[in-house]
Image (spheres, rainbow, N blue to C red):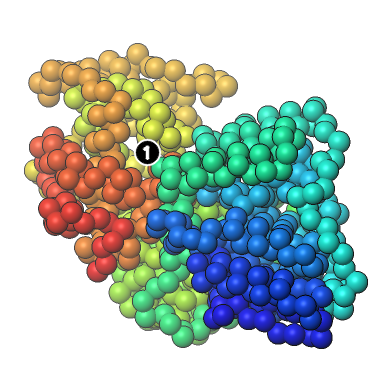
Amino acid sequence: MGQVNIIRHGAVAVVTIDEPPVNALSKAVREGLISAMQALAADAEVAAIVLSGGPGRFIAGADLREMSLPPEVPFLPDVVAAIEAVDKPVLAAIDGAALGGGLEIALACDVRLGSRHATLGLTETRLGIIPGAGGTQRLPRLVGVAQAISLITAGRVLAADEAMALGILDAVADEDVLGDAIRQAPGAIKRRVSALPLPARDGKAEDEMAAKALKGAKGVPAIAEALRVIRAAGEGDFTDGLAVERAAFLALRESEAAKALRHLFLAAREAAKVPGLAGVAARPVARTAVIGAGTMGAGIAVALADAGLPVALIERDEAGAQAGLARAAGLYEKQVQSGRLSPDDAAARLARVSATADWAVLAEADVIIEAAFEDLTVKREIFARLDGIAKPGAVLASNTSYLDLDAIAAATSRPQDVIGLHFFSPANVMKLLEIVRAGRTAPDALATALALAKRLGKQPIVAGNCDGFIGNRIYAVYRRHAEYLVEDGTAPQDVDAALEAYGFAMGIFAVSDMSGLDIAYAMRNRRAATRNPAERYVTIADRLVEAGRLGRKTGAGWYAYDEAGRKAVDPVTEALIAETRTTRGITPHRVSAASIQRRLLAVMANEGAKELAEGVALRASDIDLAFVNGYGFPRLKGGPMFAADQAGLTTVLAEVEAAYADGGAGSEPAPLLVELARSGGSFASWRA
């Protein structure tokens, strides 16, 4: 049967799924499972069935690529029904991930055995959908409605012991879960979960779990639907509940939110696949170091320590080094106070961080990350000094967010070891890690950076070397066009409100105030000598900085801030904007929220198209991941390139042409965007 095999052990038949790498529920697997169950149900010599995913596996869920295509029979509920219809005990031997549809398959079995490596969860809400093959109806019969609400709406993944404590697993095997299942199968009895009565309802607990779920929903429609459908488990018979679940699942499956979340899930799988790295081994990493113990350096050190790596924080003097260590300690203290870490865990992690002004300790490090001030001269001096200290083969990384990595690498005699590791603040929290490949970066140095990102739990995005790399290059264009809108008559708060209505947690001007207006000001000054005189330049932000209005840290920027940090429209900023318009001879005109959204999305996608054509970004989905994980782009919109595809590239091109008329040089339509719009193509289907 191809992906599904049957082996007899006397009267016990073992059905094994073999669909590498994770046994996703492809059409072939679904067909094979139904065929196997029907054949074994009719075989009088078979007394019991064991369902296995093979060593280290079970079923990791649906085949998401198939979910983006028209549905094909048999559907997953057909498989679940076929398993439950067998009038012989069916045991699930779970030695790995039983997630989503994989757990729904296990819930259709009569007995569930897990190894110590087993993980279980109904994770569909993470993808904007709900379980669609009985998960919302069977799980409450094992754990109760309140607990099912908590597990399903959060998409929680349980370790084996917790799953057993909740009653989802019947037993946990210390060693050979498949062997245990085969031995237990002859004495097993039928125990269909669908026939079990619901545990006693606890209305107060259900309401508390529901309120918590809705509070954390962040606009995901699947959360409210999951609540409604789970509660339906107790309001009718099992068949009625299945019908309610299936209707909700099918509606959500085709929603824009679900499509966006599926896109991001698949994009994350693709991001680490870099041409030219097949078979390239990463260098061993046992010890690390960070040069620069400021806010960013301390955050990077904590991220490394969290991953179990010893890290040395290096500063110019002992006072600076100890201040950096105190910053790292403060980050851990915040986690203790919030309950995310125990005091003992925090102390153990902080013990991995040392701080010193003695550069000699760098000779022990396998990866050295420079996190100094964003100045090319400073960074080149550091890398030149590392040449005489770092051991052969050490990866020399810069945390630069804009600067020319090739110029930094040229300061060393080993440019093959130099790479960019652009962390986002706070570095121990933010998921994005932009990995910048310089012109002479060795393949194994790049492989080491990708392996380190995985160890840190970061989302790696590989970028080519250019000013601002993938994210900041696009962000600079996004900010510039937001400033054009303001100079032309739209208030900063209206731009921000439009972006927040689109799904951003904060508008761009509020973010600028939070980051500090002096950061972008320094970047603009650095670029001033090479700026195209035909590019429209807005001076409002420069004037704010020159007036000492740097954002939240000075109590005023685009907005005014009170002592509690609450922002308000600032008459001083309004007057400065009005004066600039008068000086430029601009008759102010406001635009709608929808127009703001279209314009800013279009210029982001346009700059992304330029990056794709230049090879700065490997694929459009990498750009989407960068903006969702590092710049606050709403996950439910899938990222700027995905959103542009959804809007239609002809529409996006028309908006870019209008933006070019407003912005001049630097805002030209990307040739790739023009090509795709005229040919009916998409960013998703484009390949270099």
In this picture, residue 625 sits left or right of residue 300: left
Question: Going by the picture, which residue comes out furthest to the right?
Answer: 187
Q: Nearer the viewer, residue 215 or 286?
A: 215
Q: Position of residue 683 (x, y in %)?
A: 27, 56
Quarter location, residue 12: bottom right
Question: Does residue 209 sit above or below 448 in this rendering?
Answer: above
- Asked whether 568 or 499 is in front, the reply is 499
Q: Nearer the viewer, residue 90 or 44?
A: 44
Q: Is residue 106 visible?
A: no
Position of the N terminus, as image quadrant, is bottom right
Residue at 33%, 78% in the rendered image:
440
What amino acid is at disc 1? Asp
Q: Where does the image place residue 140, in percent across and percent down from the top left?
A: 76, 44
Res 577 visible: yes
User: Badge 1 local density, few (<14 within 10 Å), some, or many (20+)?
Assistant: many
Q: Which residue is mark 1?
A: 518
Q: Report the side of 134 relative to 530 (left or right).
A: right
The residue sitting at 83% across, 31% down in the picture is 202
**Residue 564 lies in quadrant:** top right
Q: Please provide percent x and percent y for residue 295.
A: 55, 48
Image height of 129 relative to 369, above or below: above
Q: Residue 51: image x %, image y %?
A: 71, 72
